[in-house]
Amino acid sequence: MKTGALVQQALQSARAGRLTLFSRLMQEVVPFNRPHRIRVVDLSGGQCKVLLPWRRRNLNHVGTMHACALATAAEYASGLCLLNAMEHQQVRLVMANLNITYPRRAQSACTAVAKLDSRHLEDILAQLDKEGRGAFVLKAQVKNADNEVVASAEITWHLKRLSA
């Protein structure tokens, strides 16, 4: 089975609430994320939530969550949210810009959440229908175990419709 077909099958299972295979498979498909052990914990209702675990590899020199690990989790949640929303579309997704702020230190495992409302999705699909490509911004928030925002990100994505 080709990787694309396997990812689609795992994504269908993830949409049904069975996330383990999808999370593990995505670590192979996106090898940069593998060392972070980011895990998909929710992929429903127009949102994607991922868990960034508290582990030594994700920490910085002062013993808090590394800024780049937080940025990676935000990017990952945002990209998966867009890909999930493009359910029956064949698209290529490339990050063009990442703007992130860190209002407080992260001293625990964190969750990154990105949400795509139906109006924003309609705008994206309309531009893809019209031009076959476009640039879109999707926000993500990263929260600590106390549900406090530790990072807020705006990610600009370039989407291009692929021919079938």
Image (cartoon, rainbow, N blue to C red):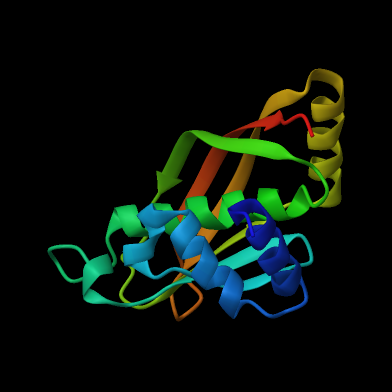
Picture coordinates of residue 111 (x, y %)? 50, 70
Residue 10 is at least partly visible in this image: yes
Query: Residue 89 appears at what percent x and percent y?
Result: 80, 42
- Residue occupying image coordinates x 76% and y 52%: 85
Locate residue 138: give its quadrant.
top right
Q: Quadrant of the C terminus?
A: top right
Count the labels in the image. Answer: 0
Q: Is residue 10 above or below residue 157?
A: below
Q: Nearer the viewer, residue 74 or 144?
A: 74
Expressed as whole percent of the image width and height from the top left, the position of residue 135 reads 65, 28
In the picture, the quarter occupied by the N terminus is bottom right
**Residue 74 screen position, x and y as percent:** 49, 55
Q: Observer-nearest residue: 133 or 67?
A: 133
Query: Looking at the image, which residue is at 68% across and 48% down?
Result: 82
With 7 as the anchor, is 88 left or right in this view?
right
Give left or right: position of 147 versus 116: left
User: Residue 37's image quarter?
Assistant: bottom left
